[in-house]
Amino acid sequence: MTVYITARGDRYHADPECGHITGPQNTARTMGWTVHPAQEVSLSEAQERGKTEPCPTCGPAGT
Ligand SMILES: [Zn+2]
């Protein structure tokens, strides 16, 4: 399956528009920091990168 990860997060997301992705991006944009776009990766790649937990908001659940 395909999931979405961010550079700094420790979770993976089912929804690239999840508030846990866009919220920090909006904060970074406001503050003039570098905005890290969400990356579309396979679930196994996300886990290899240390994103071991599903997002509590958008899932994916039951993995
Ligand atoms: Zn999410």
Image: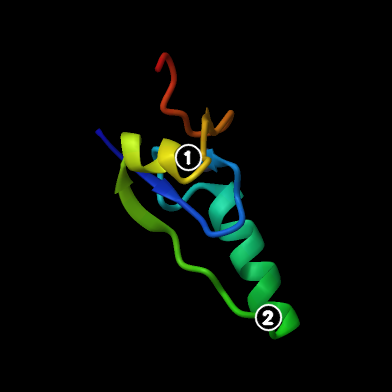
Q: Residues within 10 Å of mark 2 (few under 14, many from 20)?
A: few
Q: Going 63% across and 58% down the picture, which residue do you hit?
A: 23
Q: Nearer the viewer, residue 43 or 59?
A: 43
**Which residue corresponds to mark 2?**
33
Cα distance, mark 2 to mark 1? 22 Å
- The first of marks 2 and 1 along the sequence is 1
Q: Is mark 2 within 8 Å of ligand 1?
A: no
Left/right of residue 8 with respect to residue 54 in the rendered view: right
Q: Residue furthest right?
A: 31
Q: Residue furthest left?
A: 1
Element at badge 2?
loop
Question: Split into 4 quadrants, where in the image is the C terminus?
Answer: top left
Q: Going 45% across and 52% down the picture, which residue do you hit?
A: 17
| Three-letter amino acid code of the residue under disc 2 | Trp
Q: Position of residue 61 (x, y in %)?
A: 44, 20
Q: Position of residue 62 (x, y in %)?
A: 42, 14
From what the image shows, is residue 24 above or below residue 2? below
Q: Residues within 10 Å of mark 1 (few under 14, many from 20)?
A: many
| Colour treatment of the image | rainbow
Question: Split into 4 quadrants, where in the image is the N terminus?
Answer: top left
Q: Going 58% across and 49% down the picture, which residue do you hit?
A: 19
Q: Nearer the viewer, residue 27 or 46?
A: 46
Q: Position of residue 50 (x, y in %)?
A: 52, 41
Q: Which mark is residue 12?
A: 1
